[in-house]
Structures are given as structure tokens and as C-alpha cells.
């Protein structure tokens, strides 16, 4: 602790360093001071101190696959290059059988989590969302289904003409194990009016998250930075997350998302710099004292910068994210997925110790050949569950992985 404080002797950040060393909560003004400080390495050192106090030398990741069942969406967000309107080239909607087959296609590493998000489809019935989860859970027993953002849950409730609490309970019963954190963007109304005018408000996003937590569904939470928000907007976003976490303790992790302006309605905006990426991660680690995990999303900030982020407050590089499409539609130049071995090399390259986690941050059990033995508090079944009725899908490499696990 004394070494940390010596580093900031005479620095404007010294009062914040004292709070950090003593484990005291930072204020809104502290957050603004961190964002506006020119001492990026100093901010990073403070964040790394907190990160190592919590997680030591561990670098988490998981083996997950992305599933985007539809990109048809009735809203018109200036930030999005991925969604399509009905009838527009490039739009698609998978049948349930196609979504199950897509989840299995090309897998080689023993998936433990499916990350499921899509557009706000204008005509899919309420039953489709339930049936999709049931089919995936039947096909891949033991695999964690992280499905539907707060924006999507609100939309599904509107489609089904149901209270969102009933929707959460129905989806949970159908197989929804947790929720991704997308759609939070920036909670401030001025920013949302410019980048995602037709989405639910920041207040509604937080309300739906609260209802998830109160009904036994943990979620993640994101922040989209680098568009039209101010430093104060970012700090406000982090403080609101922290306040809800004080109430519910329902957020599993925080994921900062860098805005990629290419191919969006805001192409004139400059992309976030690497220094901004690192500072956002660091300030988030310092402000979110009640959120256990801060993630560096390698798909967005790049495979060279993500390991550096493990020394700027991040403890988790998210996952293998096989077949990421949303960020790549906006111009991301990273790979669309990495293998387990590549993730571990990236973490070791940063001098951290890889820890393959499941959705609950428990270690995934594998045998010497890499076969999954236990994850998500489930022993993986020795035989596959039957395919959904009516499926004509052929076996895939994931079938073999699950059958042998």
C-alpha cells in the first residue's frame, strides 16, 4: 500500500489513491477526475491494484458460441450496422431447427455457454422465444444459455402482451440461465436520443435488470463509449450500475464496448483510441467496487490491446465468441472467434494465469484430451439429448464433442 501511495506523491490523483488503498468508495467527482487525468498509467496502476487485490494473477475466459437468430429489427439505431428491416437484403430469421443447427455448426472446443441476442423482430410470436430456449436446452444439456438483453425482454413482453416479470419467469422456466448486458449503451437520455432513439430508456433498462435479479436471473451490464457521450455521462452510467448492484447484487460482470462508427449512421465520428479503451476499463474497475468482474472484450479492442487491459483493471477476456457478427458488421477487423488454446496464449502473453471459467466463474473441468467433464454446475451427459422434433439436421462436430463429454 505504501508503494502505491508513494507513486502518487504530489499527484492530483493522490486523494483518490488514498481512497483506493483504503478500499473506500469513489465519488462521482473522483470518476470525472480519473477520466480527465493525463496520467493514464497512474489510473491504470490504481485499477491494477484493485484488480490484483480481487483476483490476483488470474485471467478468466470461457468457451462460448454466439447465436444471433434474427437480425430483423423494427428500431433504427444510429449506432447499429448489423440489423435489417424486413424486405431489405441481408435480413434473416432462423427457424428453431436452423438455430439449433447453427449453434452446433463448426464447433471444436467443447462449448459451455451459448450467448443469444438478436433484433427486435416485428412479427415473431411469444411462443417462438420459449420454444427456442426449450429446443436448445434439450439439445445441449448442461450448456449455459445466456439469452436476451433487457431491451429484448421488454420487447418480448410487448409482443406477448405480458408483464415483463411473467416473461422473465416463463423464459427462465424454458431454459434462460442468465442474460447478456447489451443495449445499456449510455443511460443518459440526451445520448440515447442521438444514438438509439427508439430503444427503451436507460431507466427502463435498469428496471428490467432489477426485475431479472429479483426473479433469480443474473445479468451482465455494458457501456457503449466513444460516440457522443461526455465524460460525465460515462461516470453517471457507472454510478447507476453501482447503485443497482448495491440493491440486487445481480450483475455478474461489466463489459465496456467501444463504438465502431464504420458502416453506421455516425461514420464521421472518430473511433476510440487504445488509450481511451484502457482508461474506460481502468475507471470502471475503480468505480464499480461492488461488481466482481470487469471484462476486456478482445473482439472490439483487438487481440494486441486486450492482454494489456489485464493490467489496467480487467480480469476477464470474455470468451472464444465463435462467429461474432454484430461488431464485425460495423467494421471490426479482429477474428470472429478464437480457440481455447489461442485464448490461453493471449492471457499467458500478458503474464497472467489462464482460468477457463463457466458462467458462474467456477473452473471448467476437462480431461487430458480437452473433453468437458463439468461446467455450470452440471456434469456433461455421456449421450446427446434427442434433437428437437422435426429437425432434419445432420450431426456436427459439436455433436461429437458433447457425445464424448
Image: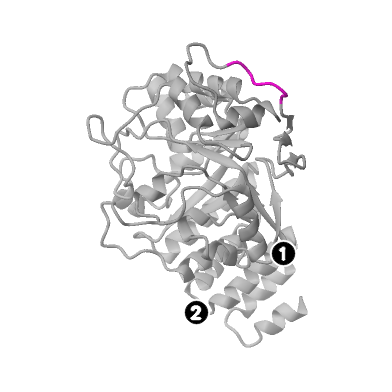
Residue 341, position as x, y percentages in the image? 63, 51
- The residue shown at (43%, 65%) is 231
Residue 9, position as x, y percentages in the image? 66, 86
- Sort mark 2 into few (<14), some (14-19) or many (20+) by Cα contacts within 10 Å: few
- Mark on residue 38? 2
Closest to the camera, between mark 1 and mark 2, is 1
Q: Observer-nearest residue: 299 or 202?
A: 299
Left/right placement of residue 76 relative to residue 272 reads left
Residue 283, position as x, y percentages in the image? 56, 65
Residue linked to disc 1? 52
Any part of residue 161 in sight: no
Query: Could you tell me how far apart the alpha carbons at marks 1 and 2 are, in whole angstroms?
Result: 23 Å
Chief secondary structure of the magenta portion: loop
Q: How many marks?
A: 2
- The stretch of residues the image draws in magenta is 381-386
At mark 1, the secondary structure is helix
Left/right placement of residue 2 relative to residue 282 reads right
Left/right placement of residue 38 relative to residue 269 reads right
The residue most toward the bottom is: 10
- Mark on residue 342? none
The residue most toward the top is: 389
Which image quadrant is residue 114 in?
Answer: top right
Amino acid at each position: 500500500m505504501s508503494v502505491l501511495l508513494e507513486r502518487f506523491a504530489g499527484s492530483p490523483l493522490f486523494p483518490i489513491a488514498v481512497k483506493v488503498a483504503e478500499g473506500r468508495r469513489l465519488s462521482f467527482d473522483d470518476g470525472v477526475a480519473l477520466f480527465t487525468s493525463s496520467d493514464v498509467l497512474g489510473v491504470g496502476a490504481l485499477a491494477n491494484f484493485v484488480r490484483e487485490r480481487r483476483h490476483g494473477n488470474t485471467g478468466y475466459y470461457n468457451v462460448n458460441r454466439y447465436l444471433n437468430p434474427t437480425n430483423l429489427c423494427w428500431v433504427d439505431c444510429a449506432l447499429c450496422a448489423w440489423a435489417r428491416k424486413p424486405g431489405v437484403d441481408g435480413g434473416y430469421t432462423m427457424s428453431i431447427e436452423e438455430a439449433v443447427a447453427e449453434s452446433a455448426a463448426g464447433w471444436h472446443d467443447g462449448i459451455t455457454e451459448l450467448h443469444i441476442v438478436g433484433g427486435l423482430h416485428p412479427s415473431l410470436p411469444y411462443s417462438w422465444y420459449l420454444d427456442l430456449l426449450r429446443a436448445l436446452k434439450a439439445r445441449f444439456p448442461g450448456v449455459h444459455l445466456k439469452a436476451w438483453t433487457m431491451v429484448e425482454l421488454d420487447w418480448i413482453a410487448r409482443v406477448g402482451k405480458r408483464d415483463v416479470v411473467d416473461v422473465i419467469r416463463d423464459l427462465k422456466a424454458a431454459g434462460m440461465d442468465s442474460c447478456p448486458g447489451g443495449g445499456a449503451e449510455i443511460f443518459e437520455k440526451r445520448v440515447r436520443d442521438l444514438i438509439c432513439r427508439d430503444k427503451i430508456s436507460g431507466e427502463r433498462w435498469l428496471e428490467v435488470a432489477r426485475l431479472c435479479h429479483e426473479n433469480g436471473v443474473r445479468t451482465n451490464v455494458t457501456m457503449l463509449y466513444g460516440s457522443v457521450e461526455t465524460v460525465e455521462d460515462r461516470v453517471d452510467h457507472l454510478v447507476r450500475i453501482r447503485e443497482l448492484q448495491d440493491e440486487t447484487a445481480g450483475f455478474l460482470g461489466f463489459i465496456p464496448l467501444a463504438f465502431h462508427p464504420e458502416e453506421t449512421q455516425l461514420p464521421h465520428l472518430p473511433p476510440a483510441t487504445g488509450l481511451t479503451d484502457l482508461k474506460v476499463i481502468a475507471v470502471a474497475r475503480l468505480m464499480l467496487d461492488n461488481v466482481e468482474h470487469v471484462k476486456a472484450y478482445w473482439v472490439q479492442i483487438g487481440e494486441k490491446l486486450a492482454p494489456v487491459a489485464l493490467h489496467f483493471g480487467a480480469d476477464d477476456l470474455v470468451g472464444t465468441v465463435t462467429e461474432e457478427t454484430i461488431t464485425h458488421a460495423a467494421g471490426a477487423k479482429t477474428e470472429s472467434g478464437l480457440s481455447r488454446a489461442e485464448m490461453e496464449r493471449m492471457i499467458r502473453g500478458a503474464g497472467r494465469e489462464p482460468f477457463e471459467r463457466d458462467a458462474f466463474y467456477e473452473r471448467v473441468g476437462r480431461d487430458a484430451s480437452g473433453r468437458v467433464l463439468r461446467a455450470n454446475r452440471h456434469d456433461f451427459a455421456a449421450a446427446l439429448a434427442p434433437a428437437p422434433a422435426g429437425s432434419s439436421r445432420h450431426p456436427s462436430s459439436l455433436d461429437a464433442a458433447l457425445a464424448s463429454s
